[in-house]
Image (cartoon, rainbow, N blue to C red):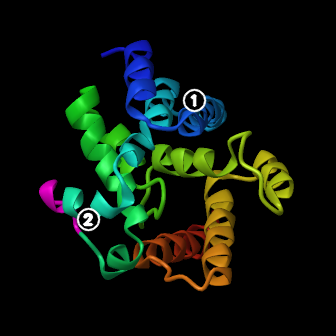
Amino acid sequence: MNYNEMQKQLKCRLNNDHRYVHSLSVSNTAVKLAKRFHISEEKAKVAGLLHDCAREIPTGSLIDEARKHHIKIYTIDEYQPILLHAPLGAAIAHEKYGITDSEILSAIALHTIGKAEMTDLDKIIYLSDMVEPHRDYDGIDEFRSFMAVNDLNTIMITAFDKSISFIIAKKQMIHPQTILARNFLLEQQKKYGK
C-alpha cells in the first residue's frame, strides 16, 4: 500500500476529522525533523501518518484489543488505557496497512511513552506528535524554539520533562517506561557528554 492509499484508508477509519488532520500534520512535521536529523524521510512520513491509527478503537475496548494482540499491559494501562493506542497502533499498521518495517512499527508503538534506547525515528515521531503545528499548550513556542537549536537527545530529555510535569500536574501516574527512557538519555549524556 502506498502513502496515498494509506491516507485514504486512514481518513475512512478515523471517526474524527481532527485526528486525521493531526495525523497529516504529524507526518509533515516528522519529515522536516527527519531531514534535519538525517534519517529516512519516507519512514518518518509513514510513521507520522499512522501513529494514531488505533485511535479508532474506543477507549473502553483498548485493554481487550491489547490482550488479543498479545501486547504487554502494565498496571498503569488498567488506569489509563488510552496509553495502549500506541502499541495497538503498531499492530494495526501491520495488519491493516501492510507495514512490515520494524523501525516504523517501533516509532508508532513508542510515540506516547517512549522507552530506553529509542531510535532516532522513535524520537522524531514522539516529538512530532508533541509539537505539530496544531498543538497549542503553555510553553509550546518556547519548546519549538529550543528544538531548533539543540541536539535530538537534549530535546528528548526536555520533552520527557515537559510530559512528566504535565502528568504530575494532572495527578496521574507516570508510565515506568517514560522514566526509564529519560534516565537512559541522562545516563548517555553523563557517559558520553552528548
Q: Which residue is mark 2?
A: 63
* Label 1 environment density (alpha carbons within 10 Å; few <14, some 14–19, many ≥20): some
Which span is picked out in magenta?
Answer: 67-72
User: 40 and 178: which one is in front?
Assistant: 178
Residue drawn at the location 42% of the way across and 67% of the way down: 116
Q: Is residue 150 visible?
A: yes
Left or right: where does residue 77 sit relative to residue 111? left
- Nearer to us of marks 1 and 2 is 2
- Spot occupied by residue 70 in the image (x, y as percentages of width and height): 14, 59
Quadrant in the picture for residue 133: top right
Amino acid type, callout 1: Leu
| Residue 24 tag number | 1
Residue drawn at the location 67% of the way across and 34% of the way down: 36
User: 178 and 23: which one is in front?
Assistant: 23
Indicate the secondary structure of the residue bearing disc 2. Answer: helix
User: 162 and 181: which one is in front?
Assistant: 162
Magenta region includes residue 82: no
- Spot occupied by residue 20 in the image (x, y as percentages of width and height): 53, 33
* Label 2 environment density (alpha carbons within 10 Å; few <14, some 14–19, many ≥20): many
